[in-house]
Amino acid sequence: MASFIYKARNVQGESIHGIIDAADENKAASAIEHLGLIPIQISHNTGSYSGSFMQFRIKRISRQELLIFTRQLSTLIATGAPLITSIQNVADQAQNPRFKQILGSIVSSLESGVSFSESLAQYPDIFGDLYVSLIKVGEAGGLLDKVLARLAELSVQEIDLRSRITSALVYPAVLASVAFIIVNFVLVAVLPKFTAIFEASSAKLPLPTRALLGLSYLARNYWWLMALAAVFILNALRNYYRTPDGRRYFDSLFLRLPLFGPLTLKVMVSRLARSIAALTKSGVPVLEALTVVETTVSNVVLQNMIKDTRAAISSGQSLTEPFKASGLFPPMVIQLINTGERTGRLDKMFDQIADFYEPEIEFTIRNLTSLLEPIMLLVMGTVVVFIALSVLLPIFNLISVIKK
């Protein structure tokens, strides 16, 4: 799906600028007409505006910006302000030019009679399936302010979780970067000065020294070839990952990785449970909630589990059995789901599952941080010792020969 920049007019004859996602220009024109607008100009979004209505560079809309929009809109609607007026007020305060334009397009859609959820669905890269589904439920039940508040709460929890994981990985990433820079500096700038001494001695060099000198030679003379090889390998892995078999293999492998695998699984299950709870609380049937949540899950292993669960429910089976058969959930989670089914309080049980996993995630992050730091230091120490021995061993051999 491509992104298109458009210029159109609404029923009042006002000029409207915006961005829309569609398969091609014809589909984009149809989507714009569906919004109640008359398209005037449509062009591919190349990353920057030009001309009369393309005067600023398009910026990516962050999760924080979406959270602020959701929270402000919820507050305004809760005070009794009309939806269109509320969105216009939020748009006036938006700092991101692209977001301001999109909100203007949404206002135009609402003025032409299109529902709020349909207007948001025109921008799937910003408003995901979960967001649109909950808005649709809020519109139908007259609970738009409460649904928006729930979406804001979900966004806060996700942003907080992402920030904790990022913070935990910053220190190991810095250590790895520093180690890479130092090793390359030694190979390119320091070792060549010892090469002449070693060659002049005509002595047989130890294996570590020969290996290090060979690596230094490659780094100095064939760095471009090593870079091309790295790009080729990464591109090949990326292309394989895009295939169904590759996606299944790597997603399954990632869940089995030491340290990172358990953390990834807990994060995904927590998000899954929180999303299902939000949908079922709003009155969405479990089967439909699973369909919506499936599109928000990135790991194919969990996607397949959700597909199996939907198939089981459609055939009249309980929700508990496919969750248990997947092997992804501990017995306590299965027991909570079973209790929720028997009592008719699945929304509450899924909330409890998310609450159960949040301290587990925090504990896993702390363990990951405490384990990664000494591992990185050990690896760096091993590299330093190897380099030192590779340089010093032939020097010691030369000294012993001279003494003789």
Image (spheres, rainbow, N blue to C red):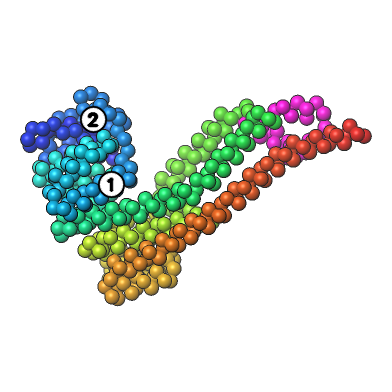
Q: Are marks 2 and 1 in contact (CB under 8 Å)?
A: no
Disc tally is 2
What's the CA distance linking mark 2 and mark 1? 30 Å
Would residue 20 be visible to someone looking at this image?
Answer: no
The amino acid type of the residue labelled 2 equals Ser
Location of residue 15 in the rendering, given as x and y in whole percent from the top left corner: 13, 31
Q: What is the secondary structure assignment of the residue under circle 2?
A: strand
What residue would you read off at disc 1? Answer: 68
Residue at 33%, 65% (x, y): give it: 351
Task: Examine the image and state in which quarter residue 105 appears.
Answer: top left
Between residues 400 and 73, which one lies in front from this camera angle?
A: 73
Q: Does the magenta stretch mainly form a helix, a strand or a loop?
A: helix
- On residue 43, the disc is 2
Location of residue 256 in the rendering, given as x and y in whole percent from the top left corner: 50, 57
Which stretch did the figure color magenta?
192-219
Which residue is most to the right?
404
Residue 250 magenta-highlighted:
no
Classify the position of the C terminus by image quarter.
top right
Which residue is most to the front?
79
Which residue is most to the top?
51
Classify the position of the N terminus by image quarter.
top left
The amino acid type of the residue labelled 1 equals Ile
Between residues 22 and 165, which one lies in front from this camera angle?
A: 165
Residue at 53%, 53% (x, y): give it: 369
Residue 142 lies left or right of residue 225; in this view the side is left
Residue at 60%, 51% (x, y): give it: 374
Location of residue 393 in the rendering, given as x and y in whole percent from the top left corner: 78, 38
> Which mark sits nearer the N-terminus, 2 or 1?
2
Would residue 17 be visible to someone looking at this image?
Answer: yes
Residue 390 lies left or right of residue 203; in this view the side is left
